[in-house]
Amino acid sequence: MTWPQQAGVLPRQAHCFQDRATAQLLEHASYGVDTVVHTQVLTGFGGVGKSQLAAHHARTLWQAGKLDLLVWVTAVTRDAVVTGYAQAAVEILGADPTNPETAARTFLAWLEPKPSTVRRWLVVLDDLADPADLRNLWPPDSTHGRTLITTRRRDAALTGNSRQLVPVGLFTDDEATAYLTAALAAHDRHEPTDQLSGLANDVGNLPLALSQAAAYLLDVGLDCATYRHRLTDRARTLTDVLPDRSGLPDDQATNVAATWSLSIECADQLPPAGLARPMLQLAAMLDPNGIPAAVLASPPALNHLAQHHNAAPGQTHPDEITDAEATQALRALNRLSLIDHNPSSPHHTVRVHQLLQRAVRDPLPADQHGRLARTAADALMAAWPEVERDTSLAQALRANTEVLTLHAEDALYQPDAHLVLARTGRSLGEAGQTTAAVHYFQQLATDTQHHLGHDHLNTLTARHHLAYWRGDAGDVAGAAAALEDVLADMDRIQGPDHPGTLIARHELAGFRGDAGDVAGAAAALEDVLADMERVLGPDHLNTLIARHDLAGFRGQAGDVAGAAAAFEQLLADRKRVLGPDHPDTLYARHSLASFRGDAGDVAGAAAALEDLLADIERVLGPDHLNTLIARHRLAGFRGQAGDVAGAAAAFEQLLADRKRVLGPDHPGTLATRHSLANLRGDAGDVAGAAAAFEQLLADRKRVLGPDHPDTLYARNRLAHWRRAAGDASVHQPPD
């Protein structure tokens, strides 16, 4: 026998093969006597190029003269592994070809290290479908030999001892763009780099998809921009924009859409049988970059799994699916590399490649697709806390809703607009992203009217939300005008006593007060409060909110003592009806402390706010909007009580937190800058105060407009501090 020897045929190297970091990792592996890892398992999502990396590594070693024996086995079944080993035994050892099992054992025995003979070998087991297929067929550990396995599986049986799991990921952005550039240039085609990077992003940097997209683009004669448009066309399936069987590049057997079908089938057969596929279908409707665990374990998600559970023959369908079974389904998908399941990241527990999601969605009938979309929306709502303590969770839920709305098409508006649509906009506003909330509800109002009509309740609700967040973003006059229009339609369609109509009247009065008509706002709130008590009852949540706002406007109108008394009574009623930890109860405590401070009891207000702040942080979390507001008021009263340095330090920290949570242009962030600038002046730095107000005035003009009350107040304070700094030419504007 002459050496070296090769058994089995390596796959042809792919056109424009990318020499990735994983390839370099394999090439740096040692074959010396100190080798600890004898088996490397390349694992990853279908289509990431595991076989190509293994073949490249094998060729590199072979061509460098580092191998005496190279064996390539296609390991899709146990029989295939036995056949591959037997063929190697026949070719190398002259074994009897009529008894494959015996020949395979003979080959494995030959691989065992022997002191008299040193043969450097590499056995590649490509596309291992099931770790159980290697039972009693693992190549032995050897100081002169190594085993390389490619598989989509990530089972624990593939790791441990001398086995190393080597994850194979997607192309990087640069690798993906470089691949497309080279693949097209080989056919004398050149496209703008931004289009190529955009196409790479469209297919999620998946090597298999990139190669097939390039082949399709060339065969059909499309430019990159046109192909990208086709790729995102919802009327086309993924198969419609990929090569047919005869046009697949690099000896590929299936297109991307079919690549994962066997893996899905295998995952669905793992315990608990029949749950992996419906779980993957649900995940296919949501954000590929991260789905919170709470969504996929919610009651609507578990009901979905129960309804679509395919029980094994002889078993009955279970009445319900447990959280543990849902987690098992996720683990089954993870074992087949169909998802990345990371329980340690609760807000991004599950990640799914976007093309796999599309391949799962495309075959669904329209009615099933619609039901799945509504189920996903139900699951998001079930996971969405009423009080968003965890800002990261809220952000993840919004991202998932955004993706869902793209995939759901009309389903979220049939038979009516799903609640998750409005919840997402409210979440933006409650997180301080008021401008984003305005834009969101503008689009939602347009979409709802398109799907359901101008007079539908959901359209009125979306318009109502839009008006509210316009006011919260600073456009008080625009909000009042919009609410007047909405209120007229609500009164006509729903009637004057509908709760939505009463709430709109309440908010309209509030925005008029914010615009300066405090007395008119108080009078209007008295009227609406009487109607709310008659229609909703004195203990209804909205009735209590109206009482809160009425007390506030009375205080602003000058009746500070009356406002404090009203808040004391409201606080008692909220504690009785809602409990001491309800956000509205905490807000009543905040308002009561503030009015006591405004009435002159500054020290008492500061003490009350300190106690309140501890409860607010415990209930709402440190980054909640109301927590930040309470910190602002507490710092202000500390300054009024004489602790200017302490107040300034508190405002500095608050400013950093508001910028982080709300952004630099949020009205609350600007308000903290206002207070901090005033404190600088009060501490003696009048020039610094003037400079700070000059910058603040420019930002408030840009964000809120020149006529907003906060902008006018900043002008007032700028003039004040300029005069204090000695600029006699400045005339103090009226407050």
Image (cartoon, helix red, strand yellow):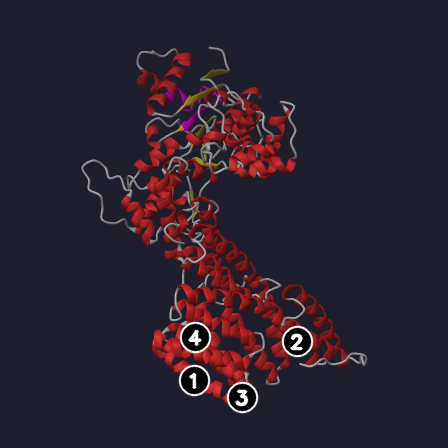
Q: Earlier in the sequence, mark 3 or mark 4?
A: 4
Q: CA distance from mark 2 to mark 4?
A: 28 Å
For image coordinates 57% across by 20% down, the residue present is: 63
Which residue type does callout 2 highlight? Tyr
Residue 227 in percent (x, y) is at 56, 32
Residue 123 belongs to magenta span? yes
Secondary element under disc 3, as helix, strand or loop, is loop
Q: Is residue 691 left or right of residue 216?
A: right
Which residue type does callout 1 highlight? Glu
**Which mark is nearer the camera, 3 or 1?**
1
Secondary element under disc 2, as helix, strand or loop, is helix
Residue 210 in percent (x, y) is at 54, 31
Q: Depth check: give the residue in front, 616 or 455.
A: 455
Q: Which residue is mark 1?
A: 568
- Judge whether residue 527 can be spotted in this image: yes
Which residue type does callout 3 highlight? Asp
Q: Which residue is mark 2?
A: 713
Reply above or below: 162 against 479. above
Q: Earlier in the sequence, mark 1 or mark 2?
A: 1
Secondary element under disc 1, as helix, strand or loop, is helix
Q: Earlier in the sequence, mark 2 or mark 4?
A: 4
Q: Depth check: give the residue in front, 487 or 114.
A: 487
**Span shown in magenta:** 107-127
- For disc 1, the neighbor class at 10 Å (few under 14, some 14 to 19, many from 20) is some
Q: Depth check: give the residue in front, 199 or 561.
A: 561
Which residue type does callout 4 highlight? Ile
Q: Which residue is mark 4?
A: 545
Q: Which residue is mark 3?
A: 601
Q: CA distance from mark 1 to mark 2?
A: 30 Å
- Rendered image quadrant of residue 534: bottom left
For image coordinates 52% across by 22% down, the residue present is: 250
